[in-house]
Image (cartoon, rainbow, N blue to C red):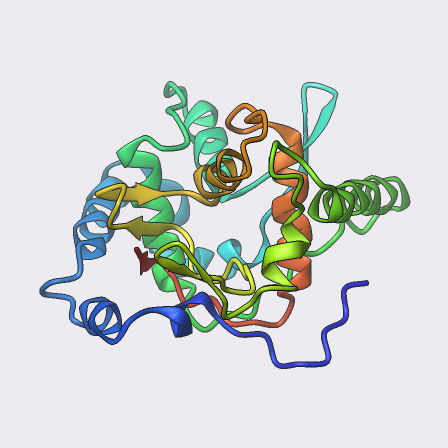
Amino acid sequence: MLSNAQTPISGNQFLSSQLQAMQQDADVNPITLWVEKGQALWRDTCQSCHQSPETLRTSAAEHPRLITRNNSTRLINLEDQINVCRERVGQQPKGLEDNDTLSLSALLHSVAKGQSIHPQPPTDALGKQRWQAELAQGAQLYATRIGRLNLACVHCHDGKVGANLRAEVVSPGHPSGFPIYRLNWQNMGSIDRRLRACYSGVQATLPSAGSQPLRQLELYLKVRANGMPIDGPSIRR
């Protein structure tokens, strides 16, 4: 179910030449502002524990992952982990789409460029069993028809790759380029926001931000893209 005979294609290859040029030029790429803010936040809030961002170079490639806190186990992604760290040092957690959260995520993804996506199950038997169950749920979500349009992720991101959908060209949906700066958002956004936008696009009930179904779907997408190099943060229409 997770095998793919073809070489996985990054969403960056579906950008227009103009957007590719913008992405490659740090002077005009808006993402530069978020990375620079992430560097400032890192010096103020993260450096005392983690030293340089490069010490967490593999972190973006390894999420989502399971954590256990207060006798509760849940699947978290990188933006969740940033807030877990905030709580650990006595700070208030912020929203997933908060500029501070996204700036730190952009920074950690930028230092992770070239790292192969490789989410890993825990090493203990119970952890592996739970991780596999979360992955299976994500795979089921990917193939389940939803919304008034009665479509599943698989119908677009496996069956219509390269086709035009309004002003968009359908990509394979590999999550190697997050977080993303979307021109129609005029802002950075997490994979959580992009997945919820897909729910909206097929006119389905939106899951709440940070909900476990979104984390399960993200896990499946990351396993589906296993071995692809991280090439985000990136620009999208």
156 left or right of 34 in image:
right
Query: Residue extending furthest bottom?
Result: 6
In the picture provided, is 76 more to the left or to the right than 125?
left
Residue 108 locus on image (x, y percent): 38, 54
In the image, taking residue 1 as reference, residue 75 lies left or right, namely left
Vertical placement of residue 160 versus 136, above or below: below
Q: Nearer the viewer, residue 140 or 115?
A: 140
Frontmost residue, 195 versus 25: 195
Relative image position of residue 206 (x, y in whole percent): 55, 26
Residue at image location 40% in from the left, 48% down from the top: 50
Is 12 displayed left or right of 228 in the figure? left
Q: Is residue 47 visible?
A: no
Quarter that holds the N terminus: bottom right
Q: Residue furthest left?
A: 27
Figure check: 156 above or below 70: below
- On the rendered image, what quadrant is the C terminus found in? bottom left
The quarter of the picture where residue 24 lies is: bottom left
User: From where the camera sits, is residue 112 visible?
Assistant: yes
Tell how many labels. Answer: 0
Where 212 sits versus 230, above or below? above
Give the quarter of the image for residue 140: top right
Q: Residue at x 71, y 41 (%)?
A: 145
Question: Residue 77 appears at what percent x and percent y?
Answer: 55, 42
What x and y, as percent, mark residue 116?
56, 70
Q: Which residue is pictured at 66% across the width and 33% down the height?
A: 213
